Amino acid sequence: ADGYYEYMMHECVYSTSDYSDMVYLNSYSFNKVVDVQFNSTVGKYVGYTEEGVKYAENFNKNQAIMQQQKAAVDTYCRPNAQVLDSSVRDKA
């Protein structure tokens, strides 16, 4: 099939029950290639393609975007992990 495939993915990665090692990843991909990604451990966007480097520069300059992304471990990841983990534990 002809066409293009563009998507954004939010991931919360952790392996401890207290979430102390939790990392938030926000990736933008085009045709299955990651162009740019925010990593909460790094604290900024990193571009992986020529276009992604441009996106990263623009995202990193935007203070509102950066504040939101840096807070995502606490505002997005932990609350969702707590709900999902408790629902799994309750069924065990």
Image (cartoon, rainbow, N blue to C red):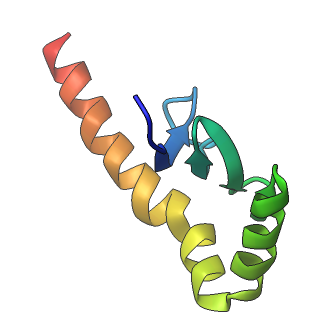
Q: Is residue 8 left or right of residue 14?
A: left
Q: Position of residue 47 (x, y in %)?
A: 80, 57
Residue 25 falls left or right of residue 54: left
Residue 17 image point, x, y percent? 49, 30
Residue at left 16%, top 22%?
90
Residue name at image x 70 percent, y 51 percent: 35
Q: Taking the image as drawn, is residue 59 in sight? A: yes
Residue 56 lies, with reference to residue 2, above or below; the image says below
Q: Quadrant of the N terminus?
A: top left
Quadrant in which residue 91 is drawn: top left
Whether residue 15 is situated above or below residue 48 in the rendered picture: above
| Residue 19 or residue 67, whichever sits in front | 67
Q: Image check: 63 left or right of 17? A: right
Count of numbered badges drawn on the protein: 0
Q: Quadrant of the C terminus?
A: top left
Picture quadrant of residue 21: top right
Q: Residue furthest front?
A: 2
The answer to whether residue 31 is above or below residue 64 is: above
Quarter of the rendering containing residue 73: bottom right
Residue at 56 percent across and 29 percent down: it is: 16
Residue 45 position in % (x across, y down): 75, 63
In terms of depth relative to the viewer, which is nearer, 78 or 65?
65
Closer-to-camera residue (89/72): 72
